[in-house]
């Protein structure tokens, strides 16, 4: 069983939602760097060393995040939904944390690694962390609106402009 750190039960200082344009810009700018301490299997993360799991760290492997693309997708979707901390880096450019929820419903947290580049590393929040429920709730409240359904039985024509 992983040892709990003092950070495990700190309440996320979740910021108010950003205006849509700012959230989209943040989502485009953030990048995922990874951290070998949160990986048992290196996958395609390109980490140096490839993996160096520590017993006191939660592992991405435990929530089935094995590809950099999936970690990046979650990071960017968290930024897009303004699942960001009020606390910023000293230069003010980046939120210190970004949260997301995996497709299987597990809450993950990303922390800033490089405040010049805006790169983050992430890990799952422990299921017994009482604040994971807050992140989960806000994730669903801030979900993007669904596209309106196409009425069944109707064909949709896409108009192509002529040159």
Image (cartoon, rainbow, N blue to C red):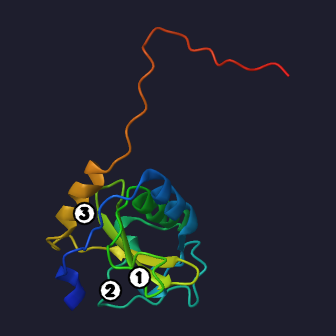
Which quadrant would residue 39 be assigned to in this image?
bottom left
In front: 85, or 32? Answer: 85
In this rendering, the answer to whether 11 lies above or below 90 is above
Is 36 situated left or right of 87 in this image?
Answer: right
**Which residue is painted at 41% across and 26% down in the image?**
148
- Mark 1 vs mark 2: which is more N-terminal? 1
Q: Which element carries disc 2, helix, strand or loop? A: loop
Q: Residues within 10 Å of mark 3 (few under 14, many from 20)?
A: many
- Mark 3 vs mark 1: which is more N-terminal? 1
Whole-angstrom CA distance, mark 2 to mark 3, is: 20 Å
Disc 1 + disc 2, Cβ < 8 Å = yes
Residue 22, given in percent of the width and then of the height, sits at 48, 59
Which one is in front in this view, the residue at disc 3 or the one at disc 1? Answer: 3
Q: Which residue is mark 1?
A: 38
Residue 63, given in percent of the width and then of the height, sits at 35, 66
Which quadrant would residue 95 be assigned to in this image?
bottom left
In this rendering, the answer to whether 94 lies above or below 83 is below
Res 57 label: 2
Residue 40, given in percent of the width and then of the height, sits at 44, 81
Q: Which residue is mark 3?
A: 135
In front: 107, or 161? Answer: 161
Looking at the rendered image, the quarter that the N terminus falls into is: bottom left
């Amino acid at each position: 069983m992983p040892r709990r750190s003092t950070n495990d039960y700190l309440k996320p200082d979740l910021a108010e939602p950003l205006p849509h344009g700012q959230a989209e810009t943040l989502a485009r700018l953030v990048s995922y760097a990874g951290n070998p301490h949160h990986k048992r299997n290196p996958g395609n993360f390109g980490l140096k060393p490839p993996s160096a799991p520590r017993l006191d760290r939660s592992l991405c492997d435990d929530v089935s995040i094995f590809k950099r693309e999936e970690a990046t997708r979650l990071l960017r979707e968290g930024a897009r939904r303004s699942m960001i901390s009020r606390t910023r880096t000293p230069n003010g450019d980046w939120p210190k944390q970004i949260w997301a929820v995996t497709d299987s419903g597990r809450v993950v947290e990303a922390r800033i690694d490089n405040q010049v580049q805006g790169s983050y590393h992430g890990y799952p929040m422990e299921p017994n962390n009482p604040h994971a429920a807050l992140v989960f709730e806000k994730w669903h409240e801030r979900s993007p609106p669904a596209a309106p359904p196409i009425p069944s039985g109707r064909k949709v024509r896409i108009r192509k402009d002529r040159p």
